Structure formats: C-alpha cells, structure tokens
Image (spheres, rainbow, N blue to C red):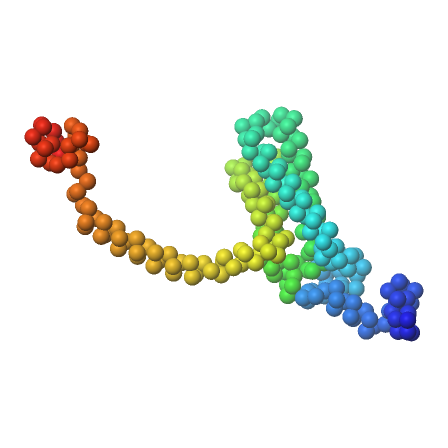
Amino acid sequence: MDEDQITSIFKDEGMMKKEQKDLEKEKLKLYIGVDCQMSFYLFDKEFEFRKFCYKAIKSKAWDNVVMLLIFLSSIKLCFDSYFLQADPESPIMKASGDIDMVFNICFIFEMVIKQIAIGLVMDDGSYLQESWNQLDFFIVMSSIMDMALSQFKIAMIKILRLLRTLRPLRVISHNKDLKMIVVALMESVGGIFNVMIVVFMAWLIFAIMGVNFYGGKFQFCNIDMYGIHTQLDCEFAGGEW
C-alpha cells in the first residue's frame, strides 16, 4: 500500500484527524439530495446524531424492520375486525389497545428519525417534500390524534380509527417497485380516461342498435312461455302475449 492508502485508513479509523475536504466529501456522500443544513434548527449536517439517523434510514435493516412493523400492524387490523362488537373493557380489547399503542410509538419514532435526518419541510429533499412521506405523515398524525382523544367519546374518533386501515399503504413508500407501479398507474390515468370515453361510445352505439333491432321482440305467452312461440297461437289458446 502507498502512503495515501495508509493515510486514508488511519483517517477512517479515527487515528488521524480528517481534513476539511475529506469532511466535505463525506458530507456530500451522506446527504445526497438533502439541502437542509439545520434539521429542526438544532442538528446540522456535522452533528453525529444526525449522521447516525441518516445512515440508519438508508440501511437495508431499517427498511426490513419498518416493513415487518407494517406487516404485523396489518395482521393486527385483521384481528380487530373479528372483535368489532366486543366489550371495550374486555381483556382482549385492552391488550389490543396496548399493542396498537406500541405500533403507534414505533411509527412515530420512525417518522421523527427521518425528519431529523433529512429535515422537515422547508428545503429540497426534506421529509414532507416527498408525496409518499406526506401519506406516512398523515397516517401517523391521525394515529397520534386517535391516541390523544381516545378517552373522549367523540364521533370523530371513530373516523380517526378507520384511518388505521391506511397503514398497509405505507408498504408502497418503502418499496421502490411498488412506487414505480403506482406512479405509472397515476400518470396513465389521463390516457385510460380517453380510452374509457371511446369504449363508452362503442357501448352506446351497440346499445342503440340493440334497442332498434330487438325492441318489442322478446315477448312470451303467459300460458306456456316455452311451448307457444307466436302471438297468434297464444291468443288462440286464450293466453296473453
């Protein structure tokens, strides 16, 4: 190994102090596409905790844990559907509420870590600048409101609890392939609408032709609808055509 390679190893291991240009390269490598310099006006890009948060949300393990939480939360929603009429004070419903609280706290923690890592809303690349994160934010905030108002008997609380069913949609924001499919579908809505107009016009044309060709020709005799096939035979038999 030459001198530059040895120096680079010592700097990476913390045995030597990194030069300013090395710090700038590391910063650019860390915060790709993130323009927020001061997250929450507290954490700048050199802050070690923010670096840790950014590395965490970009790791594969983070995505796997979040996907597991979403999967378990979806199973929990399926479980709740079997106990819609259960007594809220029953042990199983109390346990269900506690589990739901744990999931909410985990999702709040995930959201906060992301916001610390990339910023909240003001700069390009911030958390709320991405539409999928906006969906996540809406779901998490509805869960927070549900927790905060769970002790009050308000009709709106039921609506907030219904919003829990949106949790499985968070899978989309954590899966690039699903994102691509959904974006492609959304972008093709205009073209699909044009095709639907053409198809509707074709249906309308054939509907008009059908009414003209077959209108008044599907009568039957009230005496024997299968044995008598003409109006004359039906009236001769004393029936009504």
Is residue 179 shown left or right of residue 64?
A: left
Is residue 123 shown left or right of residue 192?
A: right
Residue drawn at x 71%, y 57% is 58
In the foreground, 154 or 191? 191
- Can you see residue 148? no
* Residue 235 vertical placement versus 181 (above, below): above
Residue 137 x %, y %: 61, 51
Residue 15 x %, y %: 92, 64
Residue 192 x %, y %: 42, 58
Q: Quadrant of residue 31?
A: bottom right
Q: Quadrant of the N terminus?
A: bottom right
In the foreground, 104 or 235? 235
Residue drawn at x 68%, y 65% is 34
Is residue 172 shown left or right of residue 223?
A: right
* Residue 38 vertical placement versus 211 (above, below): below
* Residue 60 vertical placement versus 24 (above, below): above
